[in-house]
Image (cartoon, helix red, strand yellow):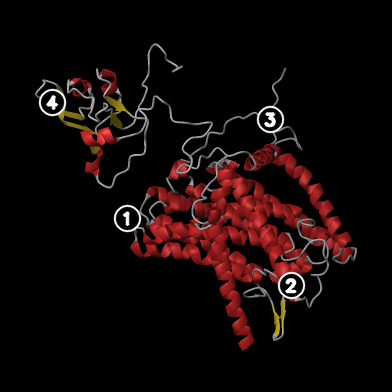
Amino acid sequence: MTFFLVSSIIKLLVIFTMTMVGVALLTWLERRVCALMQDRLGPNRVGPFGLLQPAADGLKNIVKEETYPAKADLWTFILAPAVSFTPALLTFAVIPFGAPLHTKWGDVSLVVADLPVGFLYILAIGSLGVYGIVLAGWSSNNKYALLGGLRASAQMISYEIAMGMSTVAVLLVAGNVSLSEVVARQQGSLIYWNIFPLSLAFFIFIVAAFAETNRVPFDLPEAEGELVAGYHAEYSSMKFSMFYIAEYSNMVTASALMATLFFGGWDIPFWSRDDVGPLPWWVTVLTVLSFFAKTFFFLFLYIWVRWTLPRFRYDQLMALGWKVMLPLALIYLTVIATAIWFFHDQLGWAYDTRFSLALFGVNLALAVPLVFVLDRGHIVAGSVQRRRA
Amino acid sequence: MAITVKVLKRPTGGTSYLRAMLKGMVLTFSHIFRPKVTMQYPEEKSSKDWTLSSRWRGTHRMLTDEQGRAKCVACGLCPQICPANCIKLVPGEDEQGNRYPLIYEIDEFRCVFCGYCQEVCPEEAIHVGVHYENSEYERGRFVYDLERLCAQTHPVSTLWDPSDPKGE
């Protein structure tokens, strides 16, 4: 019991610190990558390579004056940043970030809370995040903020469904909702990573995750051209900063989820040493690094996409959510469930390489008509319309 | 009444969203490795691509003669032509009948940096300078008196010459 408590508290502190520091560095990374993509240098003054810039920003935000709109609903106004901030951090609790650590007092599973209902917990807490945004928009007594909040709620509800549906396929393959089991299922070989048997689920998931985290091209709640700053237009100083931190921790969580659900979690590719325990401590450290490398890749992808793609129009966003993503997720779920039933129950295949490859084939077969529909009538054509001679 | 959104008819032949998107992503990624245009300002004040023009009109400078006295003869042309009315000049006269400024002050906040004072000056005394770093702790410090104007060392503007429009 003591061992459990002590190890849990240590894990809690480590994860909390790492998320907060990660979020701080992510704001720095976002600005640096943005600058580099625009042929600039970005913040490079505070500390080496500007790495202390987030600390300077944080200090500035803490000492800045807080302003409250005269007719704001004050309590809700104060509560909203916390409501948006807390679920963003809570979600990380169930994500396994490394192989179990073998110590002389016993094995420590590297996940803060290995909930048996891990995935349901993520869906539940993840959808709570929208409350903070809606409350912020409503309590500000500002039409732009209200519109931003309404957009956020509509958008998050629309894409929540597709996101949930796409991950049901992962649960079907894993046969469990515990994230540790989902990761364990993907051990052994690269082909077991869910990206192969469930490629389209990953496609749906990544689009929905971008929408859920309100990032470009789905950042309509804060579309600055139309809504000033959206739901946080009236917020200043640390309260504004809390929304910022919440957005970035949502990104971290979504990236970690992509790595966990589709890219084998902490599994190290092309290396079987990490597949069977008990592992020496240095292998555990390597698995943790592997997990963070994958997460980092998706975080970079977020930034990369943000500085490349333009924003959707509101009706396009809704059309994509309800007319494309939702039917796609439903059809996909039906097909993949049938395929699993056929391969596993009828043909009696185990969950092995043959099974993964067969599912991958099903995904490829589905991808062709999908690309055809998404691209309005071609499989892959030139990116620019050619002038007719 | 439901709000309808006007849906534009866009050309679809030959355009592929997925490929266009990937192309854009490759483009932005390739920019990461391109040379940067940033000039590290306080350390670097000019680069091969950018340098302050010799015709730049910044804060003023009064030129002095060999004895270190201001060249100004207090003719009164510069306060006369100044469109912003920012030059205060009180002329004085010594025993030989030479005019000199008793008070010569330029309010750099009022000044619009047109450079007319330099153009009109018969003695080539007052000049606008090739200079832009003017920070002070008090507003009052932006009213430059004669002593301050004479003490400036930055280069002076060449202004625009109609007979040599490109400055060659």
Q: Are circles 1 and 3 on residues that touch, CB within 8 Å?
A: no
Does mark 2 fall on the same chain as mark 3?
yes
Give the vertical position of B60 relative to A113 (above or below): above
Q: Are marks 2 and 4 on the same chain?
A: no
Q: Earlier in the sequence, mark 3 or mark 2?
A: 2
Disc 4, disc 1: CB below 8 Å?
no
The residue that disc 2 covers is: A282
Q: Gap in Å between the C-alphas at discs 3 and 2?
A: 50 Å
Q: Which residue is mark 3?
A: A384
- SS for tag 2? helix
Q: Give the amino acid at mark 2.
A: Trp
Q: CA distance from mark 2 to mark 4?
A: 86 Å
Q: What amino acid is at disc 1?
A: Pro
Q: Quadrant of residue A377?
A: top right
Q: Nearer the viewer, residue B68 or B58?
A: B68
Q: Which residue is mark 1?
A: A69
Which residue, given by chain and number where applicable, does mark 4 sit on?
Answer: B91
Q: Is residue A266 above or below residue B103?
A: below
Q: Position of residue A86 (x, y in %)?
A: 50, 67
Nearest to the eye among marks 2 and 1: give it. Answer: 2
Figure label count: 4
